[in-house]
Amino acid sequence: MKEIKNNKVEVQKLVLAIKNQDKEAFAKLYDLFSGSLYGIAFKIVRSEEAAQDVLQDSFVKIWKNIQKYDEKQGTIFTWMLNITRNTGIDYLRKNKHQSNIEIQNAHHHVDDKNSLQSVINTDHIGVKDALSKLSEDQQLMIEYLYFKGYTQQEVSDELNMPLGSVKTKSRSALIKLRELFITIIFWIQWI
């Protein structure tokens, strides 16, 4: 197996076979790279059981999305590494969100006055107003990436939009927001 890992042509043949739904080729790809990807998953989630779950979910995503892999964009290992990394991050977010829900339910009424105050303060500094000045595409990117916590790849998949377009639109949204907030900061300084 080590010979295949170092032989780019053989790996490309495996990928082509997998794109044609060859399960044996997929098993070989798993054998080649699962150890390295498990190591990445473990570094992110810091648990053997969770890393195994992340690895399994990653390989399911790899199988389902292999048609999206483009060798011109990078190696198959880099592509799989990004899927594994994002799956690990999603795992942490999901578990953090679930633990936050439990904490919020337990202490739901403890700090209602301060929660309301923080919402009011956010509105006072012009966040809602600034977002309304973005184009619909830019607002959508901010909504998914920052308020819903999606990764750029997830936004691309969800909206059926090329990843490059997601990156361009999100970058332009952030540049526009930065300009708007700089204006607000200067305005506040002169009050």
Image (cartoon, rainbow, N blue to C red):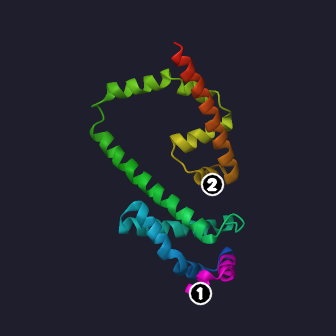
Residue 8 position, x and y percent, is 66, 79
**Discs 2, 1 touching: Cβ within 8 Å:** no
Magenta stretch, main secondary structure class: helix
Q: Quadrant of the N terminus?
A: bottom right
Assess disc 1: are there few (<14), some (14-19) or many (≥20) residues with their C-alpha within 10 Å of its C-alpha: few
Of 4 and 186, the residue lying toward us: 186
In the figure, is residue 117 to the left or right of 147? left
Which amino acid lies under the numbered mark 1 shown in the image of this protein? Glu
- The tag earlier along the polypeptide, 2 or 1, is 1
Q: Does the rendering let one see residue 165?
A: yes
Residue projecting furthest to the right: 72
Q: Which residue appears at 47% of the width and 55% of the height? A: 90
The answer to which image quadrant residue 83 occupies is: bottom right
Residue at x 54% of width, y 14% of height:
190
Task: Report how many numbered discs are placed on residues in the image.
Answer: 2
Q: Which residue is mark 2?
A: 157
The CA span between labels 2 and 1 is 34 Å
Residue wearing tag 1: 3
Q: Is residue 23 above or below residue 146?
A: below
Q: Label 1: state its secondary structure.
A: helix
Instruction: For residue 1, say whether it is visible.
Output: no
**Secondary-structure class at tag 2:** helix
Q: Nearest to the eye among marks 2 and 1: give it.
A: 1
Give the residues drawn in magenta, as a range. 1-17
Location of residue 75 with respect to 134 vertically, above or below: below
Image coordinates of residue 6 in percent, x first then y, are 61, 82
